Image (cartoon, grey):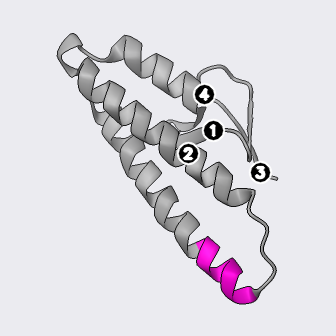
Amino acid sequence: MAEFECYVCRKKVKTGEKFTFTKTGSVHFDCFASTRRKEVSPEKVEKLSILVSLLDSELTHLLNILNLQTFSAEAKEMLKTRYKDIEKNAGETTRMISEL
């Protein structure tokens, strides 16, 4: 499994945990959300809350897909394609949060 270091708390980030990547590097979901809540201006708090909820849902969905067991090549390819699509969406949501 891949291992990274969270740039906020400096603890290891492992595959199987909720995390994302920003321009600064890898970051735990909770560290990222907490940091952004402190930095975002009051008029953007509602938008941040919605985006954080979306990102949480996307990351949870990714972890659920990782836990699915499949044996056929066709099913594995389908899961890989869906995973990449959701991962792309999570990346876009992360970018939107970073830009607030």
In percent of width and height, residue 90 lies at 46, 50
Query: Residue at the spot x=60%, y=39% of the render?
Result: 19
Name the residue tied to disc 3: 2
Q: Depth-wise, is mark 3 or mark 2 nearer the camera?
A: 2
The answer to whether marks 2 and 1 mark residues whose Cβ atoms lie closer than 8 Å is yes
Per the image, the residue denoted by label 4 is 7
Work out how far the residue at label 2 is from the one at label 1, CA to CA, in angstroms.
6 Å
Kind of residue at disc 2: Leu
Amino acid at the residue labelled 1: Lys
The label nearer to you, 1 versus 3, is 1
- Residues in magenta, as a range: 73-80
Position of 43 with respect to 96 (left or right) is left
Which amino acid type is marked by label 3? Ala
Q: Distance between the residues labelled 4 and 3?
A: 16 Å
Query: What residue is disc 2 on?
Result: 59
Horizontal and vertical percent position of residue 68: 74, 63
Labels 4 and 1: the sequence-earlier one: 4
Give the CA separation, mark 1 to mark 3: 13 Å
Q: Which mark is residue 18?
A: 1
Q: Is mark 4 on a helix, strand or loop?
A: loop
Secondary structure predominantly adopted by residues drawn in magenta: helix
Q: Residues within 10 Å of mark 4 (few under 14, many from 20)?
A: some
Q: Which of marks 4 and 3 is in front?
A: 3
Residue 7 coordinates in the image, percent (x, y): 60, 28
Q: How far apart are marks 4 and 2 (CA)?
A: 18 Å
